[in-house]
Amino acid sequence: MSPILAVHICGGTLGLVSGAAALSFRKGSRRHALAGKVFVVSMLTMAVGATCLAIQKHEPGNIGGGILTFYMILTAWLTARRTDATTSKFDWVVLLIPLVLGLLLWVSGVEKMRSPGPPKDGVPVGMNFFLGSVLLLAAAGDVRMLLRGGVAGTTRIARHLWRMCFGLFIATGSFFLGPANRPLRFLSSVGLRQHVFRTVLREEVLLFVAVLPLLFLIFWLIRVRFTNAFKKTASPDRAPEDRAAFHEHGVPRPLVFETWDRNPTGEPK
């Protein structure tokens, strides 16, 4: 096993675990902040490793997937790291990533539709159009943010959420459904694939786990955009240990999810 592959696998595995933890912990808490930091570092490491491996193997599709993951996680982290209504020149540079990749994926999808036989890269045509559309929507969101001088309030929370969740979805899809299906390969190596696959890791189970981040993405977007779970002003009754977590991790005060609303019973919604 090459060092790059080892780093890629370790980063991806740690990213899956820390991503699940970040989704489970109360948003804005000390544990959520810590799990989020581990997730970002792990996913960026995994994405860089995937891109390097794809370049070595001359796999354009995986090169794009690595760059896409890096872009999603990086911009999600920047959104949480900054204060409201803040942009930089770096955002104009990063905008080129979803714009160029999105157009290339659409062009590739059209070429596959015109070509006879199955796709040479093994990627279905629908996946080209799906990922291409997501990237172009991300580019449109970047343009909107830049023209308005940044994002604030629930818009900033939503931007952070959907990009983090989509980056996690790319990792789970690759891990559970990709050609290098890690769980099934491990079970095969120890001679348990047939037994465990029939009883536990059936195709529908792997598919559900792979798309679970997308379900969380939809849930959180609905909650943030269409409910009163989050407000634009900080809650004065926030737990002291949660407020300290933001400062301890070097995060600006108005971080995403710091505006956690509470119900009349005093418990988080």
Image: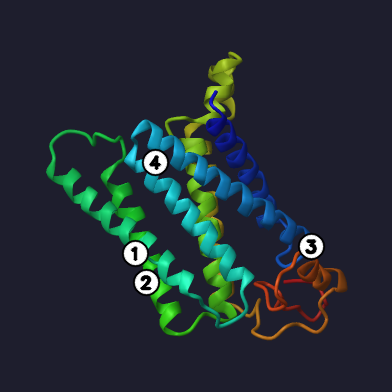
Q: Are marks 1 and 4 in contact (CB under 8 Å)?
A: no
The amino acid type of the residue labelled 2 equals Ala
Instruction: Write down the quadrant of residue 268 in the picture.
Output: bottom right
Q: Residue tagged by mark 2?
A: 140
Q: Residue tagged by mark 4?
A: 62
Q: Is residue 133 shown left or right of residue 37?
A: left
Q: How is the image coloured?
A: rainbow
Question: Which of disc 4 and disc 1 is earlier in sequence?
Answer: 4
Q: Is residue 32 shown left or right of residue 82?
A: right
Q: Residue tagged by mark 3?
A: 30
Question: Which of disc 1 and disc 3 is earlier in sequence?
Answer: 3
Q: Is residue 218 visible?
A: no
Cα separation, mark 3 vs mark 2, equals 33 Å
Q: Residue tagged by mark 1?
A: 136
Question: Which of disc 2 and disc 4 is earlier in sequence?
Answer: 4
Query: Farthest residue in the front direction?
Result: 89
Cα separation, mark 2 vs mark 1, equals 6 Å
- Which element type, helix, strand or loop, lies under badge 3? helix
Q: Is residue 109 shown left or right of residue 142?
A: left
Mark 3, residues whose alpha carbon is within 10 Å: few (<14), some, or many (≥20)?
A: some
Q: Do the residues labelled 2 and 1 touch (CB within 8 Å)?
A: yes
User: What residue is drawn where x is 57% and y is 78%?
Assistant: 154
Cα separation, mark 1 vs mark 4, equals 18 Å
- Which element type, helix, strand or loop, lies under badge 4? helix
